[in-house]
Image (spheres, helix red, strand yellow):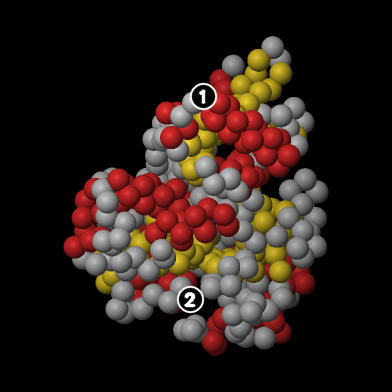
Amino acid sequence: MIWNETKECMSRDEIHNMQGARLRKTVSRVYHNVEFYRKKMQALGLEPGDIKGLEDLNKLPFTTKQDLRDNYPFGLFAVPQSQVVRVHASSGTTGKATVVGYTRRDIEIWQECVTRVLAMTGIGVHDNIQVAYGYGLFTGGLGLHYGAENLGATVIPMSTGNTKRLITMMEDFKATAIACTPSYLLHIAETLEEEGKLDKVNLKVAICGAEPWTENMRKEIEGKLNLRAYDIYGLSEILGPGVAADCDAHKGLHVYEDHFIPEIINPDTLEPCKDGEVGELVFTTITKEALPLFRYRTKDLTSITYDPCECGRTLARISRFKGRSDDMLIIRGVNVFPSQVEAALLEIGETSPHYILIVDRINNLDVLEIQVEVEERFFSDEIKSLERLTKKISNLLQAALGLAVKVKLVEPKTIARSQGKASRVIDRRKLI
Ligand code: DLL
């Protein structure tokens, strides 16, 4: 196994000391260069010298996406424009886009983080990797691209847009690895199957992320494509892809704690959660130059453990994401995450991982309908088998969610496929 022992296998004391020292430096630099944080700290009666180490982290103010929007586009940057070598931005479906910036050093660190992830999955200089995340303002494409190039692998910069061409090149260029969203990889698998090419491609590793997916989905992908699939996490505000990723043990994602300090908080009380307890993930960056952030609230829900991993790494691990707090649906008082539906559906052999949740309000009552694709044969067989399967899925989902749901089985290819982040929910209540 290849890993960078000096950074990934330090003792917990060494990690703490390094984080403390980097935090002190960051706080002082930010205080002097970012008016927004200086004012926030002053309002709390804080001087940079009050942050002596990790034990003082919780004195610092939180940062939210709204703070980035309010300071659009470059208001939170801690360096002059001349030192910024790249910007990325989120799509900003609601309100303004969130803009992030990088100095040359930030780009180098980002590259190194992604390189570590790829090395952790076993990718090396002999691999040909298709990067099929979107290139452009989204961090997925360029993030994976430079990390893979830095590692010395051969990059095939596909971006998204043309699945047939991607498959032709996968075959012709003998791609051994692919990086894309898990939902897009399923679509690629489906297309390979249709074209009778599943055994003509030579993929060994997939680096999937940018959206929540379950362990069942990971196994489904591994089985369909006969490869090893890994989970990569990141967000543009903190870095882009490469903040954390899972190793061969698949027992949580290792956080690159030499650059980011993770915390898990209760999103209602803002108090820290115990290790192993699910809450909102919060990050403080400790090496970022252009856009350092204190205690950024990601809205991503997970838990953390500091126990050493069986792979030998000592870095903290966050569990596979349950979803985002703003993805959570509240239906007749019950909290529902799309990931719970996915996990339950994938327990049943006859369904595919293509599903959508539709929430509606009928006669003042919230109703959840789950549409899921099932194999063609259920539609050609006698009607009873379809009814039987509908009943089986309804019972299973009711038990998993604690809520009665309406299940509609649909034919293959009915639910729209996505090449980027999949959209799994239509909430018609918001449209009323
Ligand atoms: O999605 C960065 C990325 C690109 C990560 C490629 C991995 C691979 P944003 O567009 O800013 O950045 O979206 C960040 O996506 O807060 C999570 O809600 C979600 N997300 C990202 N990776 C995962 C993952 C990129 N592995 C938001 N599992 C985050 C679950 C993920 N959710």
333 relative to 187 in the view: left or right: right
Residue 368, position as x, y percentages in the image: 64, 27
Residue lying furthest top in this view?
363
Identify the residue at horizontal 27%, vertical 51% (top origin): 196
Residue 351: x and y in percent read: 52, 41
Image side of residue 342 versus residue 51, left or right: left
| Residue 28 or residue 12, whichever sits in front | 12
Residue that sits furthest to the front in the current view: 382
Q: Residue at x 54, y 73 (%)?
A: 248
The image quadrant of residue 170 is bottom left
| Residue for badge 2 | 120
Q: Pointer 2: residues within 10 angstroms few (<14), some, or many (20+)?
A: many
Q: Report the Cα–Cα distance between label 1 and label 2.
A: 49 Å
Quarter of the figure that contains the C terminus: top right
At label 2, which amino acid type do we have? Met
Tag count in the figure?
2
The answer to whether any part of residue 286 appears in the image is: no
Above or below, 112 against 216 in this view is: below
Disc 1 within 8 angstroms of ligand 1 (CB) = no
Q: Can you give x and y, in whole percent of width and height, for residue 222 in the image?
A: 46, 61
Q: Nearer the viewer, residue 326 or 219?
A: 219
Marks 1/2 in contact by CB < 8 Å: the verdict is no
Mark 1: few, some, or many residues within 10 Å (few <14, many ≥20)? few
Dot 1 amino acid type: Ile
* Label 1 sits on residue: 383
